[in-house]
Structures are given as C-alpha cells and as structure tokens.
Image (cartoon, helix red, strand yellow):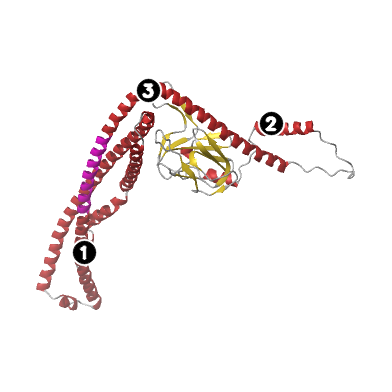
Amino acid sequence: MKSPTIISAWSSHPAVNRWLIGVVLALALPVFCPAQNKQDLEEKRKKLIREIEVTDNLLHKTTRNKAATLDRYVTLQKQIERREKLIETLGEEIAESEAAAGRTVVVVESLTRDIQTMQQDYGRIVRNAYRRKEMSNPLLYVLSADNLNQAFRRWLFLRKYDRYRKTQAEAIVATQQTLSKKIAALDASRREQETLLASLQGQRTALSTEMQDKEKLLEALKKDEGRLRDELKQKQAAHEALNQAIERVIQEEIRKKMLESRRAAAPTPAPSANPTATPPATTPAASASNAAVEEAAVSESTAELKEDATSLAFRQSRGRLPWPVEKGFVARGFGRQKHPTLRNIEITNNGVDIRTDENSAVRSVYAGVVAGVQFIPGHDYTVILQHGNYYTVYSNLSETKLNKGDRVTANQTIGRVSTNPITGASELHFELWHQKERMNPAGWIKK
C-alpha cells in the first residue's frame, strides 16, 4: 500500500517545515533582547522629557535680573545636558526602530513565500482528492479490503488524509493572520520612526536656541566677575557655618552613644567587705578630671560604635532611598568641582543641591529621630535626622514644625523649601553622613 508513504511525505513537506519555522520566528522575535532594549529606551526618553519639562518651568520662574544670571546659567546648563541625552536617546530609538522594521520585513517576505507555496500544494491536494472521489467511492475502497485489518488501515488512512487536508487549510489561515499582524506592526514601526525623527529635529532646534542663550549668559557673567566673587565669599561663609552646626550636632550624638555604650559595658563594682564603711569622697577636681578623660576618649575614635539594627537597615537601603522632594534636578553634585564660570576657582559641596519648584514639600528619606534643628543665615532652617549611625541633613527650609527628639516616618513632610527672593531659585541642600564621614547622597537615592 502507498497510503503510509503519502502521509509520511506530507508530514515532512518543506512548505510545512518553513511554515512552522516562520511562525516560530514571527512569534519569538518580539520577546527577544531588541524588544527589551526598545522598552528601556522608551522609559529613558520619557524620564528625560519629564526632567526637561521641570527645568523649563524653573527657567520660566527664575527672574531675569542681574543677580539671577548665575542661577539661570546653571539651570540652563543642566537643561542642555538633558536635551543632549534626549537627542542621543532618540537617535538610538530610531536606529532600533529601523532594525526592528528590517527584521519584520524579513519575516513578512518569508511568510509570503510560504503562503504561496502552501496554497499551491493545498490546491494539488484538493484536486487529487476530487479525482479519487470521482474515480472510486471511499466506502467501496474500504469495503474492498481483503480482511478486516486491511479495511481498518484503509479507513485510518482516509481519516488521516482528510485531517491533514484540514490542518493544511488551518495552517494557511494562521499564516495569513500572522502575516497581517506583521504588516500592521511594520506600518506602526514606520509611523513611529517618522514621529521620532520629527521629535529629534524639534529637540535639535531647541538645543541650538539654548546654546545661544547660554553663550549670552556666559558673556554677561564674565563682565560681572567681581560681584560673583563677592557672592561666592558670602556663600562659602554660610556653608562653613552650616558645616560647623552639623558637625556639632553629630558629634554630640556620637558622644552620647559612646558614653552609653561604655557605661553599659563597664563591670559592676564588687560589694564592699565592710558595708558600713564610707566610700572615699570625690573632689570636684577629680570629677572634672574623670569627665575630661572620658570626653577625650570619646573624641578619639568612633570605632567602638557598633552597627545597630537601625544602622543596618538604613545601609541596606542604599540606592533605594526616595528623593527628598517630589521633583527637581541636581544643580550641584557632591565633592570638589569647578565653579560654573569663575576660572581657577573650585568649590566643595558636602551634599547635593536640588533645584525644585517654589514652596515644594521636603520629605524625610527614611524613618528617624530629629537630632537637631538649626536656623543658619543663608541656609534658613536645617533639620538633621538620625538613623542609627547615619544622619541625613535637609537645609534651606523656609519652615519646619519639628523639634529635637521628635520621631519622623519615611516620606513624612518635614518642611518647605525656601525661595531666594532675589534670584527666585528654590533649592534644597541635602547631605548624608555616616558618623563623622560625609557621603555622596547620589549613591543612596534611587535613580
């Protein structure tokens, strides 16, 4: 009998194999790395656009008087950096979209060829089946078998043949549907490319305008260098006063914790053999001497301070702490850096300066205890929160209702950011300390 040969030949037909491969590729391609990369680029683009919108609002609110020129320059510089990153991201998105369109074209061409081949093969199957039906009755073909076993095999062959023909028809329909989806995806990809190209051109035009404004501001600042140097001296004096206030509060808290730790670890004095004996009197001079020795020992090192549960939990939150304000951008980063306009001048920042909207709420980044509240000219109110052996500092607050010893929760509003009445800039100064060591907050706050 030739029936098994026919079935075997059709089950391994090249058109069927190509159809299976084409469908698998068509379904698998969207979930490969390029799709993930595209999603990452989209998220990056949306984030940059949100940041640019925030900076645009701040630029509109910043006054254009002479005193605000430096603030406008710094804000515009950050705006240009973000727009350049956005242009770069748009370029990557366009390249990825073109690559995805190319991959889709390959799949569409392959599926089109497979459909044509499958339709031709299916036509032959139908014609052959029709001829056999005309020449002989399938029922007679089964009944004319020599024995019952042969009749059963003939019936099974006819059933499989009909099932295969139906499967081929379904395969053609499924391939056509997949092809339609891929063509629609290709059209959407091309429309997306056109949108991205238009956005890219718009961003380049905006960047060119901002670069021109930046050059004008820079020329104005160069002519006003004397005033900038005087302002810098005043700011440095205010920063030094802030640093000293923070250090005093933190050192006092460290001193208390170390004294408590040492007293808890001190051995209990043995009971006296003569309970009626009077202990030796301690003179004021001796008491003062003991206190001085204790204070000196505390000031020598903080190595004895053990990491408690709060300190450990705070440390494990590194990179996941929320922003202290809802929105804004870092105008000045941590550490030593060149002055934006004054040549050969470096400034040191013990934290980060976050430019935000006027009267924005300032929130605690982690639950803690208020270690101190200070009012410092040039920085207004400063709140210092303790989190075990870690401290967060929020400076340049226009108001706060907290007092020393108060407990705060994560994301609790602790005050409002101040706005410079001359420049119109609203800026939060944020610091992070580990015992006596200043740390870069950028590595702790989530991106």
Q: Earlier in the sequence, mark 3 or mark 2?
A: 3
- Picture quarter with the N terminus: bottom left
Label 1: element kind:
helix
- The correct choice, above or below, for 328 with respect to 165 in the image is above
Location of mark 2 (residue): 296
- The correct choice, above or below, for 375 with respect to 110 in the image is above
Location of mark 1 (residue): 170
Tag shown at residue 23: none
- Residue plotted at (51% across, 30% down): 239
Q: Amino acid at mark 3?
A: Asp
- The correct choice, above or below, for 96 with respect to 179 in the image is above
Label 3: element kind:
loop
Q: Is residue 374 visible?
A: yes
Residue 444 drawn at (x, y percent):
48, 41
Task: Measure the alpha-carbon separation of dots 2 and 1.
Answer: 88 Å
Residue 416 drawn at (x, y percent):
47, 43
